[in-house]
Amino acid sequence: MHFEAGNSGWAELGKFWTLPNMLSLARLVIVIPVSWLIVVDGSLLWILGLVLLALTTDYFDGRVARWSHSVSDWGKVLDPFADKIGGGMVIAALTYREALPLWFFVAIISRDLAIVCGGALIKWKTGEFLMSLNSGKVAISAVSITVLAALLKADPPIMRFCLIVATALLTYSLLRYLIRFILMVRASGGAAFDESPDQGC
């Protein structure tokens, strides 16, 4: 496998104003009232309803893109961005309400930041977007279940179990992303990553 280092900038990402991309953006908008309702201890029915709506947009954006043949690099950026920002805001709100521990929030933010930085570096140096790994999707599903348990004020033993499982899966998925990053660096011969030793994310 060979990656061209010359394509280091942000190339043409395709059409932005497409229905799949609007669904991803809608998810970012929906999460604002969700987070606010959590912070003010608002109606659980409204919270769950809006969360369900956000999950619906997440389910359909990729499928609509494939059905309508409108898959674009913008979609590859917006979908995980909406997931990470939206999930981070909800978990931050639950942490503020002390429904989730601070260390769990820090662990998720640190993992997401590492993955985003690694993906941005690969894109910058090779011009290639990386798709989400299945292990990452499973981990996020576990986080979603943990968030739901926190919203429903599950008993402490159930919350501990959810936190342990979610953290284990997050750690495993991070290792998988790290392995993929190392393999891509090796596949490119490392040359594309030697231009500036102090590049950040």
Image (cartoon, grey):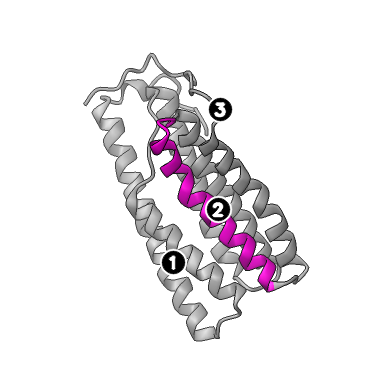
Q: Of the residues shown, which amino acid type is indicated by label 1? A: Ala
- Provide the secondary structure element on which disc 2 rests: helix
| Residue 139 x, y percent position in the rendering | 41, 59
Q: Of the residues shown, which amino acid type is indicated by label 2? A: Ile
Vertical comparison of 17 with 104: above or below: above
Residue situated furthest top in the rendering: 6
Given contact means CB atoms under 8 Å apart, are the residues at marks 2 and 3 in contact?
no
Q: Nearer the viewer, mark 2 or mark 1?
A: 1
Quadrant of residue 65 in the image? Answer: top left
| Residue 99 x, y percent position in the rendering | 63, 73
Q: CA distance from mark 2 to mark 1?
A: 14 Å
Q: For the magenta stretch, what is the residue range?
A: 44-71
Tell me if residue 45 is in the magenta stretch.
Answer: yes
Return the residue at label 3.
16
Q: Earlier in the sequence, mark 1 or mark 3?
A: 3
Q: CA distance from mark 1 to mark 3?
A: 33 Å
Tell me if residue 131 is in the magenta stretch.
Answer: no
In the image, 134: left or right of 2?
right
Dot 1 alpha-carbon crowd within 10 angstroms: few under 14, some 14 to 19, many 20 or more:
many
In the image, 177: left or right of 36?
left
For the residue pair 170 and 58, the one nearer the viewer reads as 58
Q: Residue at x 31, y 21 (%)?
A: 191
Magenta span main SS = helix
Return the residue at label 2.
109
For the residue pair 50 and 184, the one nearer the viewer reads as 50
In the image, 194: left or right of 86?
left
Vertical comparison of 146 with 171: above or below: below
| Residue 93 x, y percent position in the rendering | 68, 62
Q: Of the residues shown, which amino acid type is indicated by label 3? A: Phe
Residue situated furthest right in the rendering: 40
